[in-house]
Amino acid sequence: MRNIVDDAGEIIAKAADDHTLIGGHHRLAVAASLGQKLFWKDTGEPVKIDAFFTHHGSSLRYTA
């Protein structure tokens, strides 16, 4: 399990080793909407927030 932290070191969310979001969905969404930079706690590398908000293989269809 890996932690996602903000620039102050506060844990924002938790993800599995394969980057599946486990907890902190709302806090991650708020941080993304505010344009905050987030980092992996164990490596200090920046987190690509957009990857958590894509829906691969979604069966939802939007019709007009």
Image: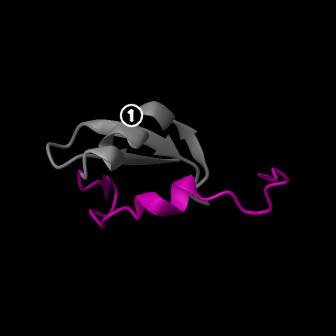
Image position of 63 with respect to 26: above or below? below
Residue at x 26% of width, y 62% of height = 44
In the rendered view, does 5 fall on the left or right side of 20? left
Identified at 56% across, 57% down, the residue is: 19
Does residue 38 appear left or right of residue 64 in this picture?
A: left
Residue 47 part of the magenta-drawn span: yes
Of residues 59 and 47, the one nearer the viewer is 59
| Label 1, residues with CA under 10 Å away: few <14, some 14-19, many ≥20 | few
Question: Going by the image, does 63 lie left or right of 51?
Answer: right
Q: Position of residue 54 (x, y in %)?
A: 60, 59
- Residue under label 1: 27
Q: In front here: 58 or 62?
A: 62
x and y percentages locating residue 12 in the rendered image: 35, 38
Query: What residue type is disc 1 on?
Result: Arg
Can residue 24 be seen by looking at this rendering? Answer: no
Q: Is residue 38 magenta?
A: yes
State the residue at coordinates (37%, 61%). Answer: 47
Residue 17: percent from left, percent from top: 57, 57
Tally of marks: 1
Q: Is residue 40 above or below residue 1?
A: below
- Residue 38 placement (x, y as % from top left): 29, 54
Q: Secondary structure at mark 1?
A: helix
**In the rendered image, which quarter is residue 43 located in?**
bottom left
The residues colored magenta run 36-64
